[in-house]
Image (spheres, rainbow, N blue to C red):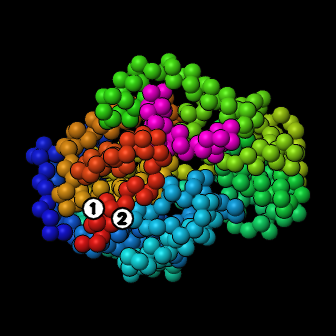
Amino acid sequence: AKAVRRRFSPKQKFYDPSQMISVVRRNASASKCSLSMTIGQRYASSFAHVKRVGVIGAGVAGLQTARSLKARGFEVEVFEKAPDVGGLWRENYVSSGVQIRKNYYGLLDEEIPHGDWASTPEIQKYILGFVDKHNLRSMIRFNTEVSSVSPRADGQRGWDFVVKDKDGKEATHSLDFAVVSHGLYSQTANMPTLPGKESFSGPIIHSSQFLSEDLVKGKKVVVIGGGKSAMDIAKVASKVGESSVLLYRQAHWITPQSILGLIPTEWIFMSRLGQALVGSYKGAWPDAPSGPKLAHTLLAPVMHGVFALLGAIFAVQRKHYGDFKPEHDFVADFYNVPQLQSAEFTQMVDKGEITATKGSVKSVEADGVVLGSGEKVPCDVIVCATGFGSSYPFFDAATLSALGVEKDGLYLYRHLLAPKVQDIAFVGAEASTLENSVTYGLQAEWLARALVGAVELPSADKMQTDVDALKAWKRSWMPESPYRSALILAHFLHYHDSLLADMKETPFRKSPNFLAEMFAPYTYKDYNGIVGAQVAK
């Protein structure tokens, strides 16, 4: 916290929420024009005012944020609505687990004690150890839900957090900076429209409520959805239930964990070679160096053939033909519903242990569901593995408008900052990569350094230009989804490189071993020392 704090350029404009709110309060009939004129009228001179930071969420993003901020002397308050840390690792559906080996989801500078393919309880134990090691528990308010985050009533920069405990008692905390770390998959559960559901004799639940096998034991089960959670639950229902039917509207690629059983998929998509291949095919990350962009221009036709061949191999491995043939090529589809899985689901479908049916629910009757085709599927339990909606219910309409939330999500500078809203950051809320825990650790460290002036931020106009370029690039080839703004996935190394360059850290973590740098997968261990050196001071 003793670091010299950088001052912004006089041209750096930010939206000051308190100013906008005051205008709206003075003139309830303010037009859209007058509202937009208010945006950007205040200039932020520095983050020197930041002493106390409020963090929403105590999952792997919020906890790593707390660690990095604490190391620089900030007073941190973490608000967690659950009774303990961990987010989805604390409580998730039965059989949930990792899709990748342990080296790709570790917390920076924290050795993982368990085996490659960990269970949810093992990962939660690992997270608990991280909390205890860094003495984070004392700064977390458990069973505390954030009701609203609004401009400070005292006129100072920052935000008023109105929070509610488990007994419904409300309190207000005036803080200098806000960090949103409530995650991508722990918000409002998406439930499909099911006409006639009130007549169904059994339970209709969301996948997040599937916390015990007893719910489906000995039952006829219909699982609605086409992603990993739907397939996981269908497998459980097949093993302990009477029957298991997976009902999906659109097939999605199941990326094998190894190619033809010979090459681990991670060696292709989690290395710089993989980044180069995907970048040459779909385009380099917008702020990547000119080399990858030139490679895309020159090699895109060749890469189209390469990935067509790879897609054909995956189609054979995971039986992606007929009704189970995806609409998009596997790279584009991966940026819609990413999943890496073993062959178990495909094998269970082949054996008739799971019935995979393409279709949608026309209506629900007492003892089953009627499909659009007219076919009736008898069932006792319906599980909707239909994901979550992204939302920020604690912000008022004016702040949401200034943030610029769109139907495909919230586009941010470096997936962290909103160019027109000052004193707020999003760590782990608008970023999804192949190494989420690693990414969130780097985001947390980037933010901590930015708050003490060790990361030089561009003007708000330059930030917005970068955001617009990223938005246009994603929309040019990624399938539309509510999370498109957050998707980084197989471009994660390009994104990590940008964060590291901002922090004046070398992005080439395996250097001087050129072969390892180009061909070996990047793991959490490659980033050790970036955060640890600061924490040790």
- 231 vs 472, left or right, is right
Residue lying at 61% horizontally and 41% vertically, measured from the top left:
263
Q: Position of residue 80 (x, y in %)?
A: 46, 71
Disc 2 secondary structure class: helix
Residue lying at 33% horizontally and 56% vertically, measured from the top left:
425
The answer, for residue 299, to whether it is visible in the render is yes
Q: Position of residue 272 (x, y in %)?
A: 43, 39
The boundaries of the magenta stretch are 256-281
Q: Position of residue 482 (x, y in %)?
A: 52, 43
Above or below for 336 versus 444: above
Q: Give residue 329's mark.
A: none
Q: Residues within 10 Å of mark 2 (few under 14, many from 20)?
A: many
Q: Specify the quadrant that holds the C terminus.
A: bottom left
* First in sequence: mark 1 vs mark 2: 2
Residue lying at 22% horizontally and 38% vertically, measured from the top left:
462
Magenta span includes 393:
no
Q: Position of residue 268 (x, y in %)?
A: 53, 39
Q: Residues within 10 Å of mark 1 (few under 14, many from 20)?
A: many
Q: Nearer the viewer, residue 122 or 414?
A: 122
Magenta span includes 262:
yes
Above or below for 516 versus 319: below
User: Can you identify the residue that label 2 sits on?
Assistant: 65
Q: Specify the quadrant that holds the N terminus.
A: bottom left
The answer, for residue 20, to whether it is visible in the render is no
Disc 1 secondary structure class: helix
Q: Amino acid at mark 1?
A: Ala
